[in-house]
Image (tube, rainbow, N blue to C red):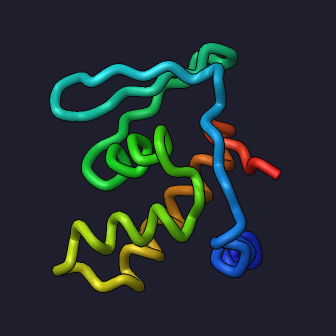
Amino acid sequence: MKQVLYHIYIMGEKMKYIKNKDIVGNCENGGYVLLNMINGNFYGLYDLAEEIWSILDSESQFEEIVKRLSNKYIDISKSDILNDVETFMQELLHEELVFIDD
């Protein structure tokens, strides 16, 4: 797992993500709910996770996602934001909610 996270960080500037087209989402009760139409799994996104998912609509490069969040949340260290984005993106990849665009 650490090797994969390290790979994401090293390849960050070039790495692009695309959302899985089989995922549908809806805002509900202060969060965002995702449904995988293939396997029926539901996912709840809140706070930063919801914001990252939203950013993926317009920006797909790892470093740009971190940069946008760092510019918005100036009270949070860039390293904390980087760690949070790495962890969340790894979870999205693992659940096949996003894919790496070669």
| Front-most of residues 40 and 86 | 86
Relative image position of residue 85 (x, y in whole percent): 47, 65
Relative image position of residue 79 (x, y in whole percent): 41, 85
Q: Residue at x 56, y 56 (%)?
A: 89
Relative image position of residue 76 (x, y in whole percent): 24, 79
Q: Residue at x 37, y 35 (%)?
A: 44
**From the image, which quarter does the N terminus lie in?**
bottom right
Q: Give above or below for 51 relative to 10.
A: above
| Front-most of residues 2 and 21 | 21
Q: Residue at x 43, y 43 (%)?
A: 53
Q: Give above or below for 16 relative to 3.
A: above
- State which quadrant residue 19 falls in: top right
Residue 3 left/right relative to 61: right
Q: Residue at x 32, y 31 (%)?
A: 32
| Front-most of residues 23 and 17 | 17
Total labels: the figure holds: 0
- State which quadrant residue 63 falls in: bottom right
Residue 99 left/right relative to 34: right
Residue 70 left/right relative to 41: left
* Residue lying furthest front: 58
Relative image position of residue 93 (x, y in whole percent): 66, 49
